[in-house]
Image (tube, grey):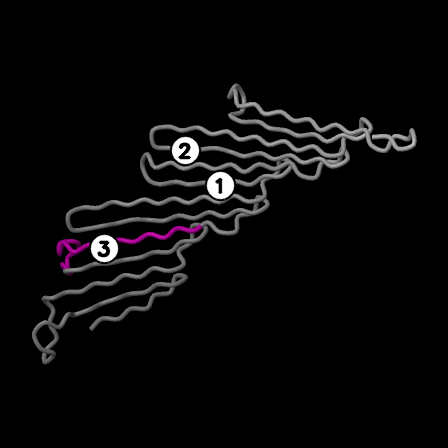
Amino acid sequence: MRVDAKEQLDATVSGTADWSGTEEDLRASMTVSNKQRERLHMAMTADGDSRNKARDGSLGLALRVDADEKFDGRVSGGLDWSDALEATMTVSNEGREKVHMSMTADGDSQDEAMAGSLGLLVRTDADDKLDGHLSGAVDWSGMTDANRDDLQASMTVINRNREKLHMAHGDDRRRRLAGRGHGWLARAWATRANGRTRANGR
């Protein structure tokens, strides 16, 4: 555009999109130039992979303003349920990890017992903020220990490989309390927090 023979604007907007899948499943970019100088550039990539019981993929975004890079980020994640369940997500900027989260879940079920666990890892700027694990079990087979409790349940919370909380509970129908009437349960429980144990039985 020229006004009174004076050039006011000499701009170009260009863009591309590629989904051939040779390197990235999808790549798109846009560039805005004025007087042969780059004013704005944006690029986006997306790729993914799918297997029998797993998915993973990533998104990338780059942004330049006046040839100065403002953002060069990537978000990647994965999901795998081939054995247990595992999910991950990572956010990076300029090649540096900013946030990473990982979650795992596992469980087992038998005729008269169930057990399972959950794990969570959170990392920001490559510093672990949380590396926790929660596990628990319930057994009503009546044959778990020498005391043959009818019901056994337990739960343990761990952070950074240190036990933070452990709880165990048992109900025994055969240890009736005198004078409490038929059908009362004898209950016992124990709680351990940061290595200190508190127990009660009645």
Left or right of 148 on screen, residue 61 = right
- How much space separates mark 3 and mark 2, taking CA atoms? 32 Å
Q: Estimate how packed mark 2 is, as few (under 14), some (14 to 19) or many (20 or more) residues with alpha carbons within 10 Å.
A: some
Towards the viewer: 108 or 175: 108
Position of 139 compared to 66: left or right?
Answer: left
Q: Are marks 3 and 1 in contact (CB under 8 Å)?
A: no
Q: In the figure, residue 196 lies in which quadrant?
A: bottom left
Q: What's the residue type where badge 3 is placed?
A: Val
Q: How far from the left and from the top, in percent, is residue 136?
A: 29, 53
On screen, residue 70 versus residue 109, left or right, reads right
CA–CA distance in space, label 1 to label 2: 12 Å
Name the residue type under label 1: Met
Within the magenta stretch, is there residue 144?
Answer: yes
- Mark 3 or 1: in front is 1
Residue under label 2:
55
The disc, 3 or 2, on the residue closer to the chain's N-terminal end is 2
Q: Position of residue 113 (x, y in %)?
A: 19, 51
Query: Mark 3, residues whose alpha carbon is within 10 Å: few (<14), some, or many (≥20)?
Result: some
Under circle 1, the secondary element is strand
| Dot 2 amino acid type | Arg
Which mark is first along the chain, 2 or 1?
2
Segment tinted magenta in the rendering: 132-149
Residue at the disc numbered 1:
89
